[in-house]
Image (tube, rainbow, N blue to C red):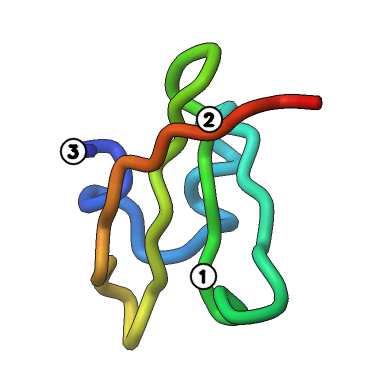
Amino acid sequence: MDFVEAASSPEDLRRGGYRVHRLSGDRRGFSTVPVASKLRVVFRFVDGNAYDLEVVGYQRS
């Protein structure tokens, strides 16, 4: 998760080659980055700082 904390926006992560996706619905304002086949890091940026970092497992359909 250091790579998220080192960035100041989702765009910084994209420039670093990460596949960043913005979330919607109840996670609106958050972004996600896949880190393994079934894991992703979910986070949000506020004033250039990453908050609410969470590793989430998910099932692809």
Q: Position of residue 40 (x, y in %)?
A: 46, 35
Residue at 44 percent of width and 27 percent of height: 39
Q: CA distance from mark 1 to mark 3?
A: 17 Å
Of badges 1 and 3, the one in the foreground is: 1
* Camera-nearest residue between 39 and 32: 39
Mark 3: give few (<14), some (14-19) or many (20+) Cα within 10 Å. Answer: few
Query: Which dot marks residue 2?
Result: 3
- The percent coordinates of residue 22 (x first, y second) are 67, 62
Residue 34 disc label: 2
Q: Quadrant of residue 8?
A: bottom left
**Disc 1 crowd, CA 10 A, few/some/many (<14, 14-19, 20+):** many
**Residue at point 53% right, 50% down?**
32
Which residue corresponds to the image point at 66% horizontal and 65% vertical from the top-left? 23
Q: Amino acid at mark 2?
A: Pro
* Quadrant location of the C terminus in the rendered image: top right
* SS category of the residue bearing label 1: loop
Residue 30 is labelled as 1
Q: Which labelled disc corresponds to residue 3?
A: none
- The label nearer to you, 3 versus 2, is 2
